Image (cartoon, helix red, strand yellow):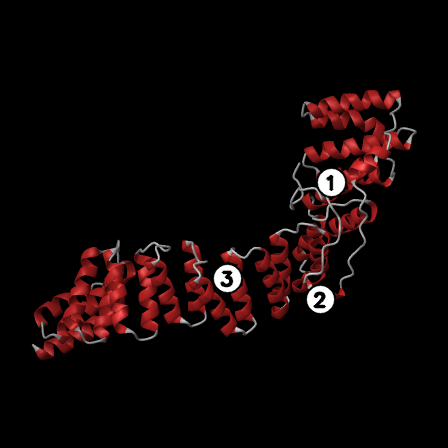
Amino acid sequence: MTKILVSAALVLSLATTAVQAGLETSLTKTCTVPAISATTTTEIKKKDKEPQLDEKTHKVYKKAHDAIEAKDFATAIAVLAPLDEKPPRKDYDKAVVQNLLGFAYAQSDDYVNAAKHLEQALALKVLPADQQAGGRQNLISFYHEADNNDAVLLAVDQYFAEVPAPRLDIYLVKAQTLMQMDRDAEAICPVYFALKLHPEPKPEWFRMLADLHGQLDLHDDAILVQQELIARVPGDTDQVIHLANLYLRADRNDEAFKMLADAEQKGLLAKDKDVKNLAALYWNNNEYQKSAETLEHGISRGVLKANEAVWKSIAQGWKQVGNNEKTLFAYGEAGKLASSGEVFLFQGEKLAELKQWEKAIAAYKTAIEKAGLGKNEGHTWLVLGYAQFRTSDFKNAMKSLEKAATYPEKKKEAQGIMLQVKAQM
């Protein structure tokens, strides 16, 4: 049987935690935290004395239970069917039969019938308290597996209304269900309740609350919650970068980049992915120099492994800000690690832009020798021919342009340059 999505850890203490400023947002301030009993399920169980089944019911129950132990769920259902059609006289016997039927159907992945029979068992309210509480929790799971979100929400509410010592992470099930139904605003309070009532709330619950606010375009509120999370897990760079993203969405760019720069200087970005994420964040916000510098710094610190892709990204960053020297250097470093000629094509084009024709020709030739140019192969022959034309190497220019003309998409352009070459020969 598939379990509920959230953590299976039992709640040991239900004392309300101290108010955390980062949780008090424009939306959570409207949430009234429910009063939860501090009675434990163990104490409840001790108070209850489990009733006895009638002899006839017990015989059928044992036979069905043995079938379930043998994983023969179809037989168990068939054995219990007569007591389902003609229920026992006692409510307790009825509840036990329906509860076992629900379990057998669930093990057969028939969650619709599992929920139906379990509902009947729970409605009688005669099972021992621990079984009743477990049944309420299982009912939530059955409806979840049956993709019945409305029933999940109702089952969660019934669970909290009836169970004296509930698992507080069930609030997250309600929140997740509301989110699946595109009811993000309603999901805020259940997450808040879990965070306020649980003695050891999980970091991902804070992140969920922050992201819910962000999805509702309440970015300043999302920042408050995310700051609370980072205070609890200060070394988690994923959360630091996420906070920076929230700052950017709130148009608080200065705060975002200052925080990231501090994180990098303090050596918090200690993983390959952290450096790449920071560089991407800078790039996406048009901070191209910072993007390139972040990658270079990551390489120099030994955090980021240098490869062709990284050096190409560095080159593109410097190219965006017009630093030709660093652009060419980065392309050169990429070329040392290149598996194809593409990076040499880029390097040649930058050299051609600077009218350094001889160096451009050398780069283009290396690109062709390296191969792997794909759809850029015809273009490489074309720009090589043009660079040779600009150095008055007309004979080789014609050869390169003739080669370029064999690629349909470059034929017209190559023929146009060949006319210019012939005019100079």
Amino acid type, label 1: Asn
Residue 7 badge: none
Q: Residues within 10 Å of mark 3 (few under 14, many from 20)?
A: many
> Circle 1 sits in a helix, a strand or a loop, which is it?
helix
Of callouts 1 and 2, which one flags the residue occurring earlier in the amino acid sequence? 2
**Label 1 vs label 3: CA separation?**
38 Å
Q: Tell me if I can see residue 272 in this picture.
A: yes
Amino acid type, label 3: Ile
Q: Nearer the viewer, residue 326 or 257?
A: 257
Residue 241 badge: 3
> Circle 3 sits in a helix, a strand or a loop, which is it?
helix
Residue 27 badge: 2
The image position of residue 380, as x and y in percent, is 22, 65
Q: Tell me if I can see residue 148 in this picture.
A: no
The image position of residue 90, as x and y in percent, is 91, 30
Quarter of the figure with the C terminus: bottom left
Which quarter of the figure has residue 167?
top right
Q: Residues within 10 Å of mark 2 (few under 14, many from 20)?
A: some
